[in-house]
Each structure stands twice: as structure tokens, then as C-alpha cells.
Amino acid sequence: MAEAARERFDLVIIGGGPAGLAAGIYGGRARLKTLILEKDNVGGRAFTTREIVNYPSVAETTGPALMDQMRAHAEKFGVEIRKEAAKSLDVSGELKLVKTRRHEYEAQAVVIATGTTARKLNIPGEAEFTGMGVAYCATCDAEFFQDQEVVVVGSGDQGIEEGLYICKFASKVTVVVIHDEGILDCNKVAQERAFAEPKMHFLWNSSLADIYGGDNVEGVHVKNSKTGEITDFPCQGVFFFCGMVPETGFLGDQVPSDERGWLHTGDDMDLGLGGVFAAGDVRQKYLRQVATAVSDGAAAATAAERYISEMNDFRTAVLESDTPTLLGFWSPEIPGSLDRLNQLREENEHADAPCRFMELDVTRKKSLALRYGIALSDQQPAVTVKVGGV
């Protein structure tokens, strides 16, 4: 196989959902050479959302319409969007390396905005009948169940709202609910609509035991959690809306995540790896909506632009200078740190060959502190590192 071509960008964004597109808009507007990689539809999971009614200033729209607007906005600022899936990310060097099946991309900064994928329950028959009656996206597949009976698993916002959309096609939609009668996990508006929809029915205190069929789904077995009774329920389709899992498997051990795969960042979306940020639903966060994803993307790209600017300025002023520089790292959060910094400055001034002295507050210059492995503590309130020069 021929060696993959390698291209250089300022900023590579992995994922083209709302977070990735917003990051692209901010990156492009900052005059960064920006690339978005999206393995599927530009717009991500939001592209498959039939109805969006809670995006500020847009009273009602569809997922595809809103995502197309975001895409056009990003492209207006010169952002390149390519349909490729990231297979790996190497963050060990100053330039980060993103590999796809055919290409390799170098970038000064990377934003991970890969979002989530539908959670699988892995019950008997689920994998076998995926694409043959088992589905995870109403917008994608509901039309294939015209005048048929469908089972929906999941009673949260996604399950009920998607189930209501399926009602436009199916003759009957039955929601399998683990709770007592009348209790759903969705918002009140969706609940009222669901109870008022004549095509929507509910199996309370229940869970799916298995799915059966021949060439396609023919039915499910439903277990009552209170009586233990197993009921045969004929149907032609089963839609799962049981939550989401983060798309972080491709990262391997390059980027730390929690035990469930979520990425943890601060308000600046920084992952603490020197130029690597995360945005959108892939983060551990309180609310996963288009509005919050866009906010994350804006913050991530702004932080990335500042990181790139800081690194470029540092390279020009220090690393490429003929004059050696003594970097003085200190923290205003540590008692005695500034006093120790001033002491180090005086020692440099009285040295036989004094260096140029550069003061760096680690709370403001986190990337440079990370670059030189500086982790200040009460035991070491300020330190110096000599760089540049001959």
C-alpha cells in the first residue's frame, strides 16, 4: 500500500456535528487554516433530528436545515470539510498527527468533537436483526415501517420524541417502559403529546427480553418486572433509544478518558495535552444539546487559536532567537512563589553570563508550563528553565 499523503493545517477538528462546525466557524474567522473531518453526515447526530424547537432565535426548524446553515457558515470562512473517519490521533509531538484510512494530517491544535453513538443493549436478536427491523434512528428508518407495528425501547426525551415521529408512518407504536404506569423519563411537553397520540401505546413495568424473526423482525418477548411474566409481542420493527456512548475508541491511550469513555475538560475545553481540546457531546457534561455543543465548539476553537498564537510567538521570540532565555515559571496561587521568582531573577542578573529573563505565570501560560513539564507545588514555588540561544 502506498504511503499516506500528509497535509499540514493549523487546526484539525475531528467531528462535523454542531460542536465541530462551531469550532470551524471560529477557527476560520481567526484566519486559521482549518479542516473538519466527518465520517458521516455533516451535522452529526443533529442532522438526523427531525424537529428542533429549542435552538435560540430559531423557533422551529429541522436538523438538516440547521446543520446545512452551519456548514455554509463554516465554509464561508474557508474551512475545508472532508468525509473521512479519524482512525488514530498522536498527541506526543508539538505537531499533532491525525490519521484516516488514506491520509495523515498534521496540526498545531486539534479539537475532538466526535459526539456519541447509540447505546446497544446487546439483547438476543439485537445484533442479528440490525438493519432488518432493528434500528436506532427514526429520521433515517421510520419511513420503512409504513402501516406496520413498531416497538420503541426507551422513554426519555429521545425515545418519546422519536417515537412520536415514527407514529407518522407506523400503524401502531408501543413503548416499552421500565417504570410504573404513567411515569416517563421525558420532558412534560413530550409526555403530554405522547399520551394524546392515538397510535402510541405503552407497556409499563417492562423490559425487552429478546427479538425474534426470520429474514426480518417478526416480534419480541417482553418481560414484566413485577410478575416476571414473559409476553410474546408481534411487531415488524424495534427502535432502540437507550442513551448514548462517547465516540472515543479511536483515541486509544493517547487521550485520557473516564471509565465510560467521556472526556473531561475545563471551561476552556483544554484536555491538558498541549494543543488538544474537546467539544460537544463527547465531553462529560450536564446537558447535551445543539446549543451547548455550539458553545463548546466556540470555546474550544478560541482556546486553540490562543494556544497556536502563544506557541508561534514563543517560537519566534525565544526558540529561534540567538539569545538564550531563562524562563521563570511561577504561580500567584502558591504563597511565596513571586518572592522565589524575584530571587531567581536576581541570581540570573548576578550570574557570570546572565540570560534574558522571561516571567511566566503558569495559570495563564498553561501550555508552556506543560511543554516543559512544570507542575508547581508548595515545595517548589518557582522554577527556571533555560532555552534558546547557541
Image (spheres, rainbow, N blue to C red):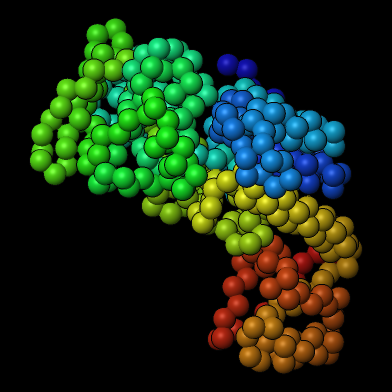
**Looking at the image, residue 318 lies above or below residue 229:** below
Q: Residue at x 39, y 37 (%)?
A: 195
To which quarter of the image does residue 33 belong? Answer: top right
Q: Residue at x 52, y 24 (%)?
A: 139
Q: Residue at x 36, y 37 (%)?
A: 154
Image x and y of residue 204, in percent: 25, 39
**Looking at the image, residue 381 lies above or below residue 7:** below
**Looking at the image, residue 80 lies above or below residue 11:** above
**Looking at the image, residue 171 lies above or below residue 362:** above
Q: Is residue 311 visible?
A: no
Judge from the rendering whether residue 217 lies leftward or rightward of residue 282; answer left or right.
left
Judge from the rendering whether residue 255 lies leftward or rightward of residue 42; answer left or right.
left
Image x and y of residue 125, in percent: 25, 22
Q: Is residue 374 visible?
A: yes
State the residue in front, 123 or 362. 123
To which quarter of the image does residue 147 belong? Answer: top left
State the residue in front, 386 or 223. 223
State the residue in front, 254 or 204. 204
State the residue in front, 166 or 346. 166
Question: Which of the image's four quarters has the N terminus?
Answer: top right
Image x and y of residue 185, in percent: 38, 47
Q: Residue at x 55, y 86 (%)?
A: 379
Question: Which of the image's four quarters has the C terminus?
Answer: bottom right
Image x and y of residue 308, in percent: 78, 53
